[in-house]
């Protein structure tokens, strides 16, 4: 069941939260997706620690653990560089 059909079905059944949940569950089951209430499985973790040194320089310590692809790691590294630039420029203007 597509989303628009599920939404229409929920609206036809009163438009309540319960109707939307039921339609969403039905759509997931139709597409073979699990509807269990179990916790999601963590694939990878990204951690970025930023430290401001006494001389006002910013040190970033990026860490990627788990099953992250090379693309994810590269994007995270790029993000870290952007954050470092923003933090450095913010630090320079506040001094």
Image (cartoon, rainbow, N blue to C red):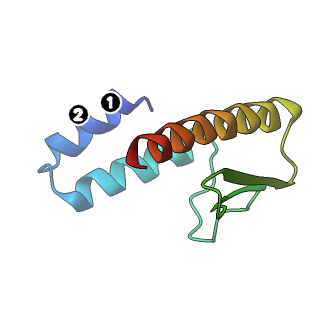
Tell me residue 84's x, y (percent): 62, 41
Residue nearest the observer in this picture, 41 or 10: 41
Q: Which of 59 and 30 is in front in this view?
A: 59
For numbered disc 1, what is the local secondary structure? helix
Q: Name the residue under label 2.
A: 8
Q: Where is residue 38 in the image (x, y as percent from the top left)?
A: 63, 71
Q: In which quarter of the image is residue 6?
A: top left
Q: Are marks 2 and 1 in contact (CB under 8 Å)?
A: yes
Q: Which residue is drawn at 27% across and 37% down?
A: 7
> Which residue does the numbered mark 1 point to in the structure image?
5
Q: Is residue 4 left or right of residue 88?
A: left
Is residue 23 toward the left or the right of residue 25 in the image?
Answer: left
- Secondary structure at badge 2 equals helix
At x 28%, y 51%, the residue is 20
Residue 95, percent across and down? 43, 49
Please tell me which residue is depicted at 25% across the width and 39% down the height of the picture: 9
Q: How far apart are marks 2 and 1 (CA)?
A: 5 Å
The quarter of the displayed image where residue 56 is located:
bottom right
Q: Is 75 placed above or below 45 here?
A: above
Residue 35 numbered tag = none
* Mark 1 closeness class: few <14, some 14–19, many ≥20 residues within 10 Å: few
């Amino acid at each position: 069941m597509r989303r628009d059909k599920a939404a229409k079905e929920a609206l036809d059944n009163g438009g309540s939260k319960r109707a939307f949940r039921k339609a969403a569950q039905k759509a997931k089951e139709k597409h073979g997706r699990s509807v269990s209430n179990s916790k999601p499985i963590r694939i990878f973790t990204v951690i970025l620690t930023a430290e401001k040194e006494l001389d006002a320089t910013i040190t970033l310590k990026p860490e990627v653990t788990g099953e992250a692809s090379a693309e994810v790691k590269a994007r995270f590294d790029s993000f870290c560089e952007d954050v470092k630039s923003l933090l450095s420029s913010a630090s320079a203007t506040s001094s």
